[in-house]
Image (tube, helix red, strand yellow):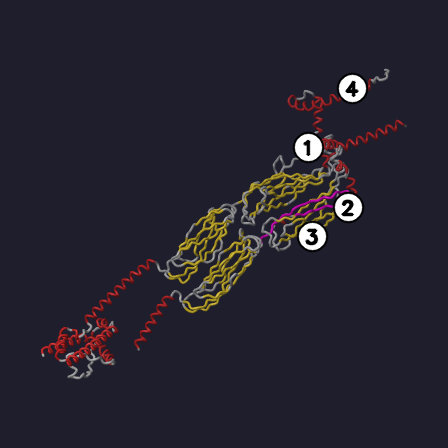
Amino acid sequence: MTKRFKAVKASIITGLVLISVLFAVLPTASAGLIFDLQSVLTVEWSANQTQQPVVPRGALRALDLTISHTVTRGVFGQMMLNVYTGKTIIINVEVVETPSWCTATIGQGTLATTVSPGEPTYVKTTLSLQVADDAPAFGLGYIKVIATARKAGLIEGFIQEFTLTFVPDYKPLIQPAYPETNTKKIGPLDTAVFPVQITNLGNARTVVLFTIVDVPSDWNAIVTDQIILEEGEGSSSTAYLVIKPPKNFGYHNDEKTITISMQPVKYDDYSKKGEITYATFLVESRGFSTPGFESIAFIGALAVAFILFTLFRKRK
Amino acid sequence: MLLTKGEIPIKLKKSITFIVVLFLIGPLISSQVQSTEAASQRSGWPYPLINVIGAVWASLNNVTILPNAYKAVPSNIAIGYNEKVTIQVGSIDLETGNFSSLPKRWFLSQAYLSYSIEYPDGNSDGWFVTFDPPVNIQNDTKLAVTNATIALYAPVSASETVQSKILRIRIADTWVFQNIWYPELRTHPEKWPIIGKENIPLVTGPVGWFVAALMGGFGKYSGKIMTDYYYVDVNVKVKPFHSVNIKALPPEKLLPNDVISIPVLVQNLGNYNDSISFRVKTKNNTRLQLTQNTTIALEPAQQGQVFVGIASPDNFLDTGTLHSITLEAFSTDQPNITIATQNIILETQGLYISEENATYSFGVGLIILCVVLILWYWRRKISETFRKKPEKPWKLPEERQHLAELKRTDKNAYEQERLMMQDEYKSAILWYKDQKKQARMTPTEGKLKKIYSSTVNKITAPFKREGKSKKKPKKAQPVLFKRPVKKPKVEKVTPIPPVGDITKEKILTRIKREQERQLRRLQ
């Protein structure tokens, strides 16, 4: 009896020693060795949805996010995973960082999936984003998103951070102003000059192309071809419209309107055009026109006066 | 065999001896195995037992390599502003060099590649890179390749330029391990003895994997997630972008035959140093002279000034003409492509008298003045010839002598004579003035007479006479020799002779006067 007890005792001690030795040999792998259940997330989206530039103040851009969930395990985790099969795992998706000119929201921030050993499970959500007017055209935009699989029982949680990149589209927007006026009263031999100040309200360097749309016959109008506005709100430049009324001999009392058009285009890509803006200027040309004959007329008037004076004197 | 106290039994002695020998020989064998491995390569199998032990040892420390390699195709690209280039990036098979799939491995729960871009110089302005798909998940049949679309846009700020550079694609290779201590029977029966086809006992079976996981140390990764990063560089050549900003100019004014040099501010909006030239054109057919082919070299975002010289035509009088001068900028690299245009609005207005014209005009005026003076002088001389101003009678020497004699002899007669002479002179002066006046009023009459024929003259003569008769009767010609005391003056209305006979009459009067004077002397 004593011998048997001793044998049992020796076996237990030997077993403890062996187990201790085993754990001593594999200290770092001890946890994984036993269970090590952990959620793993991967996030996918369609690159086509981010390749197209996002129009500022345009329609919301929706990105479909597909999140796959798997549970990995250690050497002794199989049984435990079988126990957890079908259990719900909560996944939170949230936007953590965006540029100041970008707003991004997750359609459904909290998602649920189930534990499925060996096979990944998929859940989907939508990320909506929009950009403000001051978003720099084709400047790199990014949205940092974190997907978190919450800890469920002995299944460890998981955090996956990923970054979506996109570029804002070009938004041409100009604001014309007339620092002096858009109406003028001049003589037939005068010239009307209208400064036109254009302010860039768009989000990129912009070329404004000017064209004379409507000018009355016999009137002459010339406008600055183009101006370039730097990027940034408040950037402005001045163009000039010069109008010359008809100056043929005689009395003039003309009131005419001259229309110009202004079209913003992207400075490095004229195919990206904005809406055409029109501006009308009213010019009143009133007065007697003696083009170039003033001096001659003066001399003639003197001669006539002299003749009249002589005749008058003779009569006396 | 009996044992005495303190004596060690023979079996125990053998055991102790074996252990001692084993402890002594073990390390020797180990070192011998290693040296034998090297020696065996040189000299074959000189020690078969040691070689076998070495082989077992090597098997326990088996080389386990899961090679990963990646590449980008193409890895050198050229791109311009507003252009996109798509390249392929992915995992490759090291043997063939071609793109390969990311095979499913039994020891991995999940494996995927995710892509991102890095800019070695830290400047990402203008670049936009997307990956489609953004993640490659392990799949036996699908290539682990993504399409990287590299887009280049003009940078937001003029001071920032995009030039050729290297883009670095970062590939994150993530492995999610499951139990890798041994292949599990439930999930990987193929690796088990008897059942598995892939089983090679003690090598790929559970025992072999366990030994390998234990000796190689990878068993500890069971249930872990590991990410390794790989980099692929893409050499990007950025095409030159030529752009220039010509600042708008306010309208300028110019006098006729004047020259102006208009400064134009120009900024290079391209991405490289550029030589920018200008073509100057006028829209309408003006006679403006313009400077051409001005060139300026500018660095990116640098501003410079060029001058456009304009000379207006020498019009005598310009009442105001608008000119539109178009300035076209082009890069000397691409002379046929206009990269910017700008209008210069110019108004020419004013009066112009050239120095040459002024000089000539002055000369001509001077000549005309001289001619006029000469004519005037000549006319005066001529008129003096025909219409000499009457002389004062009392100043004539004979008359003076006669008056002196009268003064001495007869004072009354002298006084009468003086009065008579004064009347005579006054009358003569009036006549002279009248003649002069008439000659001035009809300056062309003489000419007309020359031109008209005698017939015309005959026809017009009566009318002229009739016309003149309406005028006041001319004063009678003074008669000096008649004494007013003896014969009181009777105003005789004499018909006014025609203008052409005036000279004749005058001569006759003179002759008469001379005759009377001679008679008076004779008396």
* Nearest to the observer: residue B46 or residue A144: A144
Where residue B484 appears, x then y in whole percent?
17, 82
Q: CB under 8 Å between callouts 3 and 2?
A: no
Sequence-first disc among 3 and 2:
2
Above or below, A315 against A192 in this view is below
Q: Which mark is residue A107?
A: 3
Q: CA distance from mark 1 to mark 4?
A: 39 Å
Q: Amino acid at mark 3?
A: Gly
The residue that mark 2 highlights is: A87
Element under disc 3: loop
* Front disc: 1 or 4: 4
As drawn, the residue found furthest toward the right would be A1
Above or below, B251 against B170 in this view is below
Q: CA distance from mark 4 to mark 3?
A: 78 Å
The residue that mark 1 highlights is: B64
State the quadrant of the C terminus of chain A.
Answer: bottom left
* Nearest to the observer: residue A206 or residue B371: B371
Q: CA distance from mark 3 to mark 2?
A: 24 Å
Please give the range of residues in magenta: A144-170
Residue B192 seen in the figure: yes
Chain letter behind tag 1: B
Q: Quadrant of residue B392?
A: bottom left
Q: Quadrant of residue B483?
A: bottom left
